[in-house]
Image (spheres, rainbow, N blue to C red):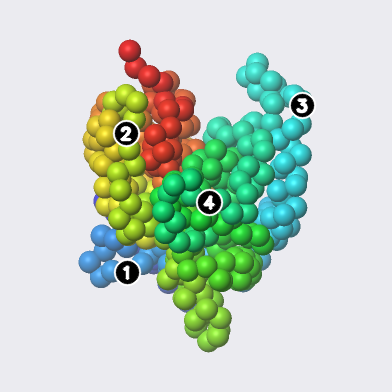
Amino acid sequence: MSACPVYGVDHIESHVARGRNMLINWADNNELTSDNSYRESLYHCLLCSRCGAVCPAKISSAAITLQARANLVQQKGLTWPQRFIHRGIVKHRALVAKALGLAAWLPRFAVNEGRPLRHLADLASTLSNGLSIPRLSKPSLSKRIPYRTFPPSGTRVRGEVAVFPGCAFEFFFAGVGQDVVMVLAEAGFEVVNPDGLTCCGLAVQSAGDLDTAALMARQNIEALSRFDHIITGCATCGSAFKNYENWFPENDAYQATARNFSERVEDLSEFLIRQEFGSPGQRDYPVTVTYHDPCHMRWHQGVNEEPRKILNSIEGVNYIEMEGADKCCGLGGSFGITHRDISLAILDKKMESIKKTGAEVVVTSCPGCMIQLMDGVRRRGLPIDVMHISRLIRGQKGPLRKRR
């Protein structure tokens, strides 16, 4: 109860692990009479896994909740929006890429708060319960980088890696995706952007649609099967990849293939530290930085020291640890839209912690967290930049504002 970000806001027993697990037990024994209330309880969980980290019995309530969602999907089926998104859009990433690519070039066609909507993403913001969604990248990441990116001339080649861009970098943060690729190339690796990839599938799996999620996992595994090192700069995608083994039934022979795949997956910061990557250089001017731990990095992957080691190694960076750095920012994928009031209340706590550090930049390793934190900065009018760690590693100025 003390660790749950949702319970910390609404104090509702059925929204914390203890109460929800009891409801799940009743549902398994056919003792519940209200399907709507039960579904509401299951989807009031962020699946951040913080409760499991502090549980003395080491019970993974997030996994229990996920299985309950899957059972509900099997019994009641998907909602029509889930069917449309999961099986009609997310499964067909190539078609999505073409559609979003065209949307990014659409002329102004509506107005939001007196400002023209230049992209479909702006319209999506008006439909996302107030969450400000970044504009679509123009062009997308795959249009900006080649199939293979080589290390700069004169750099010792240390090997080959495959990069998994993920949907956020591909369509919304293409510049950050380029930074991830260039960090790896500048570290001496030939970076391959493989063909045939699809969404990591975590959003689909978290909704309880395990069959569709397994199909996505299989497609990504096949596309990346020949690579010894698979790197991602997205905490969400990384946590999905490292857990693919559990996306298949125990009696499924493909589970061993998924396990072998997961063992070759690393987050960008995790990989750089293990490779003993030297100091990434220095910034042109001093900057005070703090770091936000994405739940999918800290609690799902157990990666928390590596980003801090990198940040502390950059000359010109004054690193300050924020209070509650490992606490959820409140996005949780679609939770930030469907439960916006709770999401904002959780975000308010995070923004207060960031503000207390006096940092000019808050760094994170998850594009989803970036969206939430950027929204928090915008709402409060704070002079703080939100950056992915790859941008700071490369010493990029933008979008930093030089202080006088």
Residue drawn at the location 32% of the way across and 69% of the way down? 59
Q: For the residue labelled by badge 3, is the local secondary structure a helix, a strand or a loop?
A: loop
Left or right position of 350 against 252:
left
* Residue marked by disc 2: 282
- Mark 3 crowdedness (10 Å alpha carbons): few <14, some 14-19, many ≥20: few
Mark 2 or 4 closer to N-term?
Answer: 4
Q: Nearer the viewer, residue 91 or 178?
A: 178
Q: Quadrant of the N terminus?
A: bottom left
| Disc 2 and disc 1 in contact, CB within 8 angstroms | no
Q: CA distance from mark 2 to mark 4?
A: 23 Å
Comes first in the chain, label 2 or label 1: 1
Residue 49 screen position, x and y as percent:
37, 58
Q: Nearer the viewer, mark 4 or mark 3?
A: 4
Using the numbered discs, state the Cα–Cα distance from disc 3 to disc 1 in whole angstroms.
51 Å
| Residue wearing tag 3 | 107
Residue marked by disc 4: 150
Tell me which numbered mark, 2 or 3, is placed earlier along the sequence. Answer: 3
Answer whether labels 2 and 3 touch (C-beta < 8 Å): no
Residue type of the residue flagged with mark 4? Phe
Q: Tell me which numbered mark, 4 or 1, is placed earlier along the sequence.
A: 1
> In this image, 150 relative to 294: left or right?
right
